[in-house]
Image: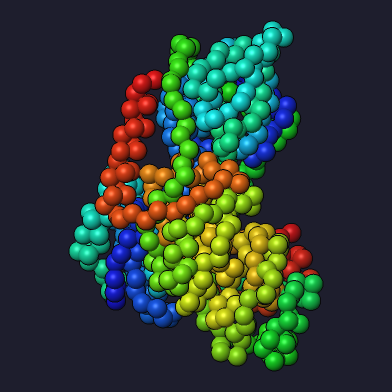
């Protein structure tokens, strides 16, 4: 349920769907997002769905908080509408040259690496949101025993394609960037491509993701 | 290749092509980008009679040194910039908000911005640039925009597609005023901070740090104490949002910001103050002042009217 609407500064609406992070709440956020995106409401110039919030930015030259709030309060969201999500398989190589934090994860989780990999590859993940850097998917949920805190000192450069874990989430670094997630492996697949303007993201909110383990030979040959 | 081009002899510090930026891409992780100081961007285009959303060259602190080759062309510089023109071996100081006609072989040296950060160099022509999502704006972090998403580099050329044929001299009397108080609206996590922390935020002075760029502005000063949690569940960000991470020092999101973040938001800078905010150079002292939403909306209307009024004077 959309619990509260407030203003975030003078050019955005902050729609609060609660504090919990789960698929049900996030799916509702995504429904609102998709409905508004299709409606192309005059003055709205950006939408940012996240776990349990939706931020609606608008052009203050053309509209204001009161107008947009009224529209959102009276909008009909189809509760049953299918999210039209995809299931995507992502190859990941966990060779020790790419699994940068596996030793750290073994210590943090008190599990050996085989158990960590087995658990990681056995699950199906849900994409809650994309962003921070262009195209980065936030995927959940990891099992309780797989939840580790961020690195105490973030890396200045996380290599492109790195797959990271933090708390209940996994992500993929779509290009080289600073970051503090525990890196378990690397995917040779292009997750974000700015040249494909219509569809730059491989993974979108609401999609299902499975990871497939590949060895270092397959990884090296992947883009040949 | 066109016969009309600028050769970049020295690129400057952070020189990029910018326009109004790109909309409706936050959900995939792409911010607005676009010219940091919108008013000065618009004025530069108006001076040289471009469409107001045309690409211009934005630079920070030190701009480029360019040599022009080709048919005569009109240019203008806005902001608070010291620059020189070299014509037929004669060197003279130029004035901002005034057009200059360049001829084959002329040079223009954008030496420095004066107690400000960003300056704008507009060319009365169509520049040959690739657009992404209808915008040339370069976001160097995501490698998006014209010039392969990279800063303009030493030695490269800027190709001119079509020169505007109206060369009439234009001049505007305008002085960039400085901002001392940044006006803000309370953020969604305002109550995460102690009474003392809130008091510090609104009463004490902060200093703009050197660690500031198109993504964000870091401030230094007394620490702002968090009494609830130094992290929130990650959610959307906007330009102007002031986050306080665990170290207690404010970070203000600017035009190339990350689209999602997990630090508490103490306040948001009002739209009317954004152009002046981005021009605060490292070492500048600032204070925050709280205002309400309806005042912020009125102030933006006034600011926008003033901008339109300046545009119509050209």
Q: Judge whether B212 appears above or below A224 on screen.
A: above
Q: Position of residue B298 (x, y in %)?
A: 28, 45
Left or right side of A168 for A220: right
B28, B290: nearer the viewer: B290
Q: Which residue is found at the position 69% from the left and 9% from the top?
A: B90
Image position, residue A130 (x, y; %) = 50, 65
Residue at x 32%, y 47% (from the top left corner): A60
Q: Residue A29 appears at what percent x and percent y?
A: 36, 70
Residue A77 can be seen, yes or no: yes
Front in this rendered view, residue A53 or A222:
A53
Q: Nearer the viewer, residue B193 or A119?
A: B193
Query: Which color scheme does this rendered protein use?
Result: rainbow
**Quarter of the image containing the C terminus of chain B?**
top left
Position of A103 with respect to A40 (left or right) is right
Q: Residue at x 46, y 42 (%)?
A: B179
Q: Is residue A220 left or right of residue B166?
A: right
Q: Residue at x 30, y 64 (%)?
A: A6
Q: Is residue B235 visible?
A: no
Which quarter of the figure has residue A188?
bottom right
Residue A102 versus residue B255 in the image, above or below: below
Expressed as whole percent of the image width and height from the top left, the position of residue A222 reads 71, 64
């Amino acid at each position: 349920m959309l619990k509260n609407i407030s203003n975030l500064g003078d050019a955005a609406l902050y729609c609060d769907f609660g504090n919990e992070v789960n698929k049900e709440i996030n799916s509702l956020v995504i429904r609102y997002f998709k409905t508004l995106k299709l409606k192309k409401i005059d003055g709205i110039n950006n939408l940012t769905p996240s776990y349990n919030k939706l931020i609606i930015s608008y052009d203050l030259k053309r509209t204001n908080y009161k107008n947009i709030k009224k529209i959102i309060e009276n909008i009909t969201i189809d509760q049953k509408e299918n999210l039209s999500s995809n299931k995507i398989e992502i190859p990941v190589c966990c060779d020790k040259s790419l699994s940068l934090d596996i030793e750290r994860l073994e210590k943090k989780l008190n599990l050996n690496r085989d158990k960590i990999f087995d658990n990681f590859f056995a699950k199906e993940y849900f994409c809650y949101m994309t962003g921070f850097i262009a195209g980065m998917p936030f995927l959940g949920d990891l099992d309780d025993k797989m939840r580790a805190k961020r690195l105490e000192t973030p890396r200045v450069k996380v290599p492109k394609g790195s797959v990271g874990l933090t708390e209940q989430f996994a992500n993929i670094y779509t290009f080289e960037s600073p970051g503090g997630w525990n890196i378990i492996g690397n995917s040779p697949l292009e997750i974000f491509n700015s040249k494909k303007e219509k569809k730059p993201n491989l993974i979108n909110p609401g999609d299902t993701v499975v990871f497939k383990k590949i060895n270092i030979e397959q990884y090296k040959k992947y883009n040949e | 290749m066109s016969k009309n081009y600028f050769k970049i002899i020295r690129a400057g510090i952070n020189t990029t092509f910018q326009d109004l930026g790109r909309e409706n891409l936050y959900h995939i992780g792409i911010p607005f980008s676009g010219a940091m100081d919108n008013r000065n961007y618009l004025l530069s285009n108006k001076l040289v009679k471009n469409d107001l959303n045309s690409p211009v060259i934005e630079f920070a602190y030190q701009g480029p040194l360019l040599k022009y080759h080709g048919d005569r062309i009109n240019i203008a510089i806005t902001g608070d910039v010291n620059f020189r023109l070299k014509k037929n071996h004669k060197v003279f100081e130029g004035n901002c908000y005034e057009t200059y006609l360049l001829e084959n072989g002329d040079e223009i040296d954008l030496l420095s911005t004066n107690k400000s950060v960003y300056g704008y160099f507009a060319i009365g022509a169509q520049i040959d640039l690739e657009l992404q999502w209808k915008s040339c704006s370069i976001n160097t972090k995501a490698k998006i925009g014209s010039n392969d998403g990279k800063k303009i580099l030493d030695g490269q050329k800027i190709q001119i597609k079509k020169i505007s044929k109206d060369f009439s001299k234009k001049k505007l009397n305008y002085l960039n005023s400085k901002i001392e108080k940044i006006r803000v609206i309370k953020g969604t996590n305002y109550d995460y901070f102690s009474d003392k922390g809130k008091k510090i935020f609104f009463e004490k002075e902060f200093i703009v740090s050197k660690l500031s760029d198109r993504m964000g502005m870091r401030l230094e000063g007394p620490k702002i104490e968090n009494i609830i949690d130094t992290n929130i569940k990650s959610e959307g960000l906007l330009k102007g949002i002031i986050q306080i991470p665990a170290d207690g020092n404010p970070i203000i999101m600017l035009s190339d910001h990350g689209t999602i973040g997990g630090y508490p938001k103490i306040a948001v800078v009002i739209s009317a103050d954004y152009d002046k905010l981005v021009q605060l150079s490292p070492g500048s002292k600032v204070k925050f002042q709280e205002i309400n939403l309806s005042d912020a909306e009125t102030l933006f209307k006034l600011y926008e009217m003033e901008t339109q009024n300046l545009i119509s004077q050209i």
